[in-house]
Amino acid sequence: MEIIQKEAFWITGFEVQATFKQLWNRMPEEWDRLFAKADLIHSRKTDTFMDISFGKNQYGIYTQFIGAAVSGSEGVVPEGMQRIEISAMECLHHQHTGPLEDIADTFGKMYDWAKENDINTGEFKIDEGYTPEKMNPLMSYILKFYLSRVNKIN
């Protein structure tokens, strides 16, 4: 695990808002919807996709954004999608290697490491590296995970 500076970037995709329980059902459907329209996202920086979690609001509703990083704010946004900018940030970075079902464990290890090292992280998370042909819970993935760093606890 390492602390890195992640540069600002633009992403085009779909926003998903739901309770934690609803996310388990909604996210596979939303990924299918994104992958079905992936060819409409122009100026993609890579062939992979990402999931950004903004955390939950005071009503327990989580906001996720799934999509592809694009080369800027210019260009046509496909119908029904949005393009947003993610600001540069200092964050904790770690690579996940394993099945989808182990993602929560990997994030848990990151939170534990941050706590052991007196680093305060926020709820903002990015996991990137998804590909349409690999959205299979039994397959192994190599994903990059980022947790926003709020500050060092003293």
Image: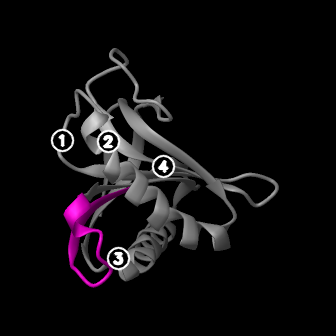
Q: Position of residue 21 (x, y in %)?
A: 66, 74
Q: Are marks 4 and 2 in contact (CB under 8 Å)?
A: no
Q: Does label 3 or label 1 sit earlier along the sequence? A: 1
Q: Does label 4 or label 3 sit earlier along the sequence? A: 3
Kind of residue at badge 2: Ala
Q: Which residue is mark 1?
A: 46
> Which residue is rendered at x = 33% and y = 80% of the image?
137
Judge whether 19 appears above or below 122 on screen: below
Q: Does label 4 or label 2 sit earlier along the sequence? A: 2
- Residue extending farthest to the right is 59
Between circles 1 and 4, the one closer to the viewer is 1
Q: Residues within 10 Å of mark 4 (few under 14, many from 20)?
A: many
The boundaries of the magenta stretch are 131-146
Q: Does label 1 or label 2 sit earlier along the sequence? A: 1
- Measure the C-alpha gap from mark 3 to mark 1: 21 Å
Q: Which residue is mark 4?
A: 149
Q: Which residue is mark 2?
A: 68
Q: Which residue is mark 3?
A: 100
Judge whether 141 appears above or below 78 on screen: below
Q: Are marks 3 and 2 in contact (CB under 8 Å)?
A: no
